[in-house]
Image (spheres, rainbow, N blue to C red):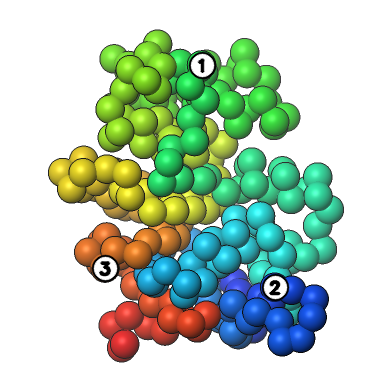
Amino acid sequence: MKNSVVSLQGVHKYYGELEPRLHVLKGIDLNVAEGEFVSIAGTSGSGKSTLLNLLGCLDDTSKGTYLLNGKDVSTLSDDQLSQIRNEDIGFIFQSFNLIPQLTVFENVQVPLLYGARSISDCGDLCMQVIDSVGLIPRLEHRPSQLSGGECQRVAIARALINDPALLLADEPTGNLDTSTGDEVLALIEDLHRQGRSVVMITHDPDVASRAERRLLLTDGVIVDAEAA
């Protein structure tokens, strides 16, 4: 049996201090095994953004536990959580979140600025990761000189640079046309086939269907999409 990369057990999330508080996530149980590709779909207001923030260690649970690679994230300090976000989670955002003044190569290097490894020792690694997403010809280009699909490939390369335990993709095709979105999804599928653990958040059922396992988030509750 494969180890769990993500394990949520009885997770609730409330907002507000006065009763009745806003109850956004309602007893979430979720396990994602090593090398698994899981999509979590849901409409606006279903709790997707809140769940994404919890999975990305950007927010904490109100109740329940979240184990990431076996670590209970609720016990970690702010500095430790920052390290987790930089080294254990690779983020792929809808809006790419690239730094416009930096080249492709420099954008991919950014996570290394916050880690223990020296950037000067990681040039070959950066080149390998950039090559893996097919962007060697764009090495010295800045985001404004790239297409949307190329920007998302840079974001994927940046997410991979620290060899994270989990790739967390937030609406990865949301800013792309259908054809370019298909190319990006194919790249994510390829990373999954190479053994990467991927959780993809999306509102689009067609995008969600590309995952190995599909879940549906409805009113703060997760259900199996195949059974829904």
Instruction: Identify the residue position indicated by label 2 in the image.
Output: 15
Mark 3 / mark 1, whichever is N-terminal: 1
Of residues 35 and 13, the one drawn nearer to the viewer in this rendering: 13
Q: Give the residue type that dot 3 points to.
A: Pro
Q: As drawn, is 170 to the left or to the right of 186?
A: right
Q: Label 1, secondary structure: give it.
A: loop
Q: Label 3, secondary structure: give it.
A: helix
Instruction: Identify the residue position indicated by label 3 in the image.
Output: 205
Q: Are marks 3 and 1 in contact (CB under 8 Å)?
A: no
From the top left corner, tell me how far across and down residue 212 is, in percent.
31, 66
Q: Give the residue type that dot 2 points to.
A: Tyr
Q: Label 2 neighbourhood size at 10 Å, few (<14), some (14-19), many (20+)?
A: few
Is residue 9 among the parts visible in the rendering?
no
222 relative to 153, above or below = below
Instruction: Identify the residue position indicated by label 1 in the image.
Output: 101
Measured in 3D between alpha carbons, the distance from the residue under mark 2 to the one under mark 3, in whole angstroms, is 28 Å
